[in-house]
Amino acid sequence: MVDLCGNAPKKDAGSPRIPGPVVIIYSCDRLITNLLSAACKADELAVFTTDNETDLDPIIDQTLAKKASPVLIIDSFGTDEKYSRLINTKLSAYKTLSVIKLVSGDIDSSLAALKDGVRTIFPKPDINKSKVGFAEGSISFTESFRSYMQKNSFSHDADIPLDAFNRCIHELGIAQEIPDLSFALLKFISEIFERSITFIVTNGELIAERGIGIRSDKSTGATAPLRFKVSLAPLSVFQKAIDDLKISFEHGEDEALRSLYKEIGPPAETRVLVVPIVSFGRVIALTYADFGAKAATPAPTDMIASLSKHASLIFDNILMRKKLEKQAQ
């Protein structure tokens, strides 16, 4: 086994010897390998590097023998079909393996990788496509990678609901009406969280639509439209998702949440999820979720974010189709 410098793969100096995430970088790009290795070393993560596929199994086996959690980073430098086979093979052989795929391609390629079971898709710097300088893009890539590794758990306890993800992708793909999109996303989120509600965003307030796990166990299925209203507060988790146009999974104790809890009761823990559906740069719906009476656990926020973006694109397509149909009448 050799790394990109011709040396046998080894842990970087200064990496911890206690069990924990072990990063395995599979790439033939020296720059990407060096950037990721430096990021891992900065956070004292054990790291192996290789450009040879046959090295992967021995490294993963060695990692598992030390009761650590392997994180395989695959840098795409071939066809999607090749990496689909590789990802499926490794995830089938190693049930506790987490896979991160680096990409610079389109959304279809990213969604295909997520369907294969990767933990997340990570955009890599591309000198031919970057709107900023390549150096700035590389720094941003490294900082984003460090932040992701710091904020996510790679324990096998954080199960990824792949079957539910694939069902959601299918349901989003065949959706003909806007409510179908939000309901597909709601059902996926309910696989992870105990309570979830879809809200329509209007001027200064949220209108509750269907919910799962609200006022009864989530096994009873979705409610009818709930219709109660929640006023938006300037510093609320809802307003943050609206302003940032991206999902939020954090602790919240703001006025808007207190208003919501008057309707559904407070959860045992304050960590909540808020997922926007965006149409032409404006949030038109939010999905709220919490763990109800249960303890909070890690959630696949990258997977949820990908579904949210996919739903937003399909939402825009539905609106455009309806507009064209109306013009043709």
Image: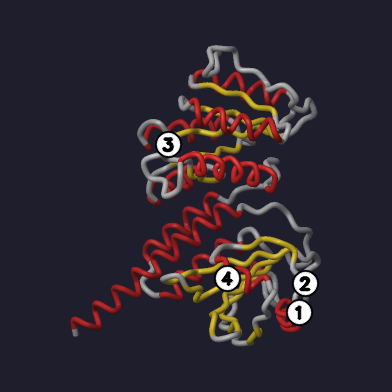
Placement of 4 over or under 88, stated as above or below = above
Query: Which residue is more in the foreground, 262 or 202?
Result: 202
Tag 1, which secondary structure? Answer: helix
User: Which numbered disc, 2 or 1, marks the residue that appears first in the sequence?
Assistant: 2
Q: Nearer the viewer, mark 1 or mark 3?
A: 1
Q: Is residue 281 visible?
A: yes
Q: CA distance from mark 2 to mark 1?
A: 7 Å
Q: Nearer the viewer, mark 3 or mark 4?
A: 4
Picture disc at residue 253: 2
The three-letter amino acid code for the residue at tag 2 is Glu
Q: CA distance from mark 2 to mark 3?
A: 42 Å
Tag 3, which secondary structure? Answer: helix
Q: Position of residue 11 (x, y in %)?
A: 68, 21
Placement of 282 over or under 327, stated as above or below = above
Left or right of residue 205: residue 126 = left
Question: Which residue carries the number 4 mark?
Answer: 243
Tag 4, which secondary structure? Answer: helix
Question: Which residue carries the number 3 mark?
Answer: 84
Q: Residue at x 74, y 28 (%)?
A: 67
2 and 1 marks in contact (CB < 8 Å): yes
Image quarter hosting the N terminus = top right
Left or right of residue 126: residue 26 = right
